[in-house]
Amino acid sequence: MSSQQATTTGAKSNIPQVLAHSPKDNVAVVVVEGLKAGTKAFGVVTEDNSTFTVDVKDDIPIGHKVALIDLSDKDTVVKYGQDVGRMVAAAGKGHHVHTQNMKTKRW
């Protein structure tokens, strides 16, 4: 896969818009302001420096997560290669994952 991916504006960039920490992750963190629905986001897996793209389906704020696979209610969310919570509502690949559809398993 090329390290440069087209965005919705047609511009090319090798600056990641989303980061996953482990190849095991099923979500990635948005690391740019104003990630808009319709963007083909360029991502990097920090553990092995591999790259990927994800078609973003919702506007997602910086610091929030995007689903890298289809996630169903009660699925485990994996970030940093670790279980960080469970889905309480479905989020398809490319959709916003945050407190509206994901909760910690601690309480």
Image: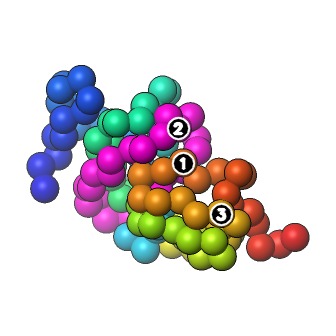
Seen from this angle, which residue lies furthest left? 2
State the CA–CA distance, disc 1 to disc 3. 11 Å
Q: Is residue 27 above or below residue 71?
A: above
Q: What is the three-letter code of the residue carrying label 3?
A: Ala
Does the CB distance between marks 2 and 1 fall below 8 Å? yes
Task: Tell me what residue is drawn at x 58 percent, y 64 percent.
Answer: 90
Residue 63 is situated, as x and y percent measured from the top left of the image, at 58, 41
**Residue designated by label 3:** 89
Amino acid type, callout 2? Ile
Task: Please tell me which of labels 2 and 3 falls first in the chain.
Answer: 2
- Residue highlighted by disc 2: 60
Quadrant where the N terminus lies? bottom left
* Range covered by the magenta-colored residues: 47-67
The residue depicted at 32 percent of the width and 42 percent of the height is: 41
Q: Is residue 98 magenta?
A: no
Q: Which residue is mark 1?
A: 96
